Image (cartoon, rainbow, N blue to C red):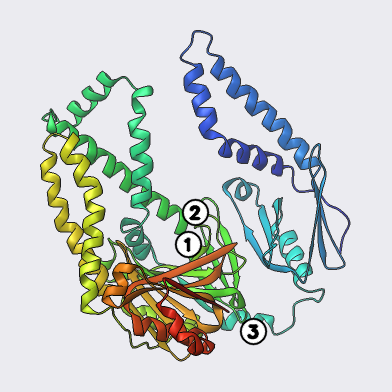
Amino acid sequence: MFEPRRQHPVAGLTQLLHILKENWITLLILFFVGTGSESAWGIYAVLGFTVLSAVGGVISWWRFTYQVEDGELQIKQGIFVRKQLYLSRERIQVIDISAGLVQRVFDLVSVEVKTAGSTSKEAKIDAITRTEAERLKRLLRSEELPKEDEAVKSETSKTYKIGIKELFLAAFTSGNFGVTLSIVGGAFSQIDQVIDEDRMLRFFEWLIPASVGVGLVFTTLLFVVIISWLFSIFGTLIKYYDFTLTVKDDALLIKRGLFEQKQLTIPFDRIQAIQIKEELLREPFGYASIVLESAGYADQQQSLNSTTLYPFLKKVEVQQFIQQVIPEYNACVEPVNPPFVALRRYLLRMVWVSLIVIVPAWIFVPYGVYSLFLLIPALIIGYAQYRDAEIGISGDTMMVQWRLLSRKAAIVRKHRIQSAETKVNPFQRRLGLMNYTLTVASGSGGRTFAIRELEKETGNQFLEWISPASTKQKESFDTDQNSIID
């Protein structure tokens, strides 16, 4: 326990950088729109906003205090509206310590405290020394000093670290390529607002002298794809640099990051499910990644509900890895596949999806008739979705596998399943098929896993496995939707 304290003054700078990061799009628009006029008011607007944000950051630092009183973290903050946040030790679930680029320059860290439950709260202290952060963590975990055998436990903990070769392979095969492609493509479509069109044409002609007509379009698309891929590579390298997983007695510790070194703590009792993801570029080479779904906690930079347990390993090593790290999720499952009659529905679904692109292209785009060739990859994807759809149980563990483009599999413990349901539409009823869906708690909401076109009897059996009481209601499963919630 200690008296109210302030952060290091660097917290004012981190607050300024956070504000600029949150508003960079607005500032960029102000800059380009404003500099287009003779008065260049955009520059003054950006500078004025930056100065006000800097002043606000300093005042915010001064008005922010924290202390630990009777095992409770008490934070007071706010410039005009004062906020008081009290987090009791019993409610605190996770204490993460990370160090961004600014903190590392001054040998500081930030501490993020998160509580459990549906009304979870979180608090962040931006700039304190690592010694102070460890002391704060110890006070919020227990009033007692570390036990003598803690060092022994630390020595016997298992540690897994991704090597440089694996890191680069993970970067080159990252599934973030699609996201970066959409961002770069959207930005490139607006580039004519900044760069003159003639100048762009001269650039591409210089880059590839023969790029005219159709060749110019192809060159532009290739340029966007390459830039997107490079951004994806660099983003993955920065995110997973020095990735280290440490397995403790009661939690998993994950450390990663080049510019911002994040340290995540995930208690075992918060893990709800694990996913095995084989990205489209990794699957041919036999590599996968493992992702955790955790209740009341998520790595917000990863996604809303998921945290990467290990970013890159051989598919044949996944089962052994799970056995060593989370043994309760290691199960040998005898999978059940959709019946052969379901294949037509998988193929037709992808045909309808491809027609959404083919029909407009045929009508409005020159040579759009060639878009009919999209039916070939659509049918291949449909068949792959049918082939890879699997579901099975082993004891108290269920495995569900599916594919959109990438292949994914989820492993769930029975007592972690929040709800399960089956759905039957008129077309499925005629063929004796149904969809099966289950949900687990994850992050602030839930994560759903589904498999399509299961045989009706099989789907009912898995629904019955979730809740044996459903046996008495088995006749009612012929309705369009049945739901059982634990």
Query: Quadrant location of residue 199?
Result: top left
Amino acid carrying mark 1 in the image = Asp
Q: Is residue 104 above or below residue 68?
A: above
Q: Nearer the viewer, residue 439 or 476?
A: 476
Amino acid carrying mark 2 in the image = Leu
The answer to which of marks 2 and 3 sits earlier in the sequence is: 3
Q: Kindly check if marks 3 and 1 are in contact, taking CB atoms under 8 A apart as contact.
A: no
Q: Across the whole image, how many numbered discs are drawn on residues?
A: 3
Amino acid carrying mark 3 in the image = Val
Graded by Cα atoms within 10 Å as few (under 14), some (14 to 19) or many (20 or more), the crowding at tag 3 reads: few
Query: Quadrant location of residue 223?
Result: top left
Rendered residue at 17%/37% (across/down):
363
**Residue receiving disc 3:** 152
Taking the view exactly as shown, the residue that stands out farthest to the bottom is 395
Mark pair 3, 1: CA separation:
24 Å
| Label 2 element class | loop
**Residue receiving disc 2:** 258
Q: Kindly check if marks 1 and 2 are in contact, taking CB atoms under 8 A apart as contact.
A: yes
**Residue receiving disc 1:** 242
Locate the N terminus by quadrant: bottom right
Query: Quadrant location of residue 163?
Result: bottom left
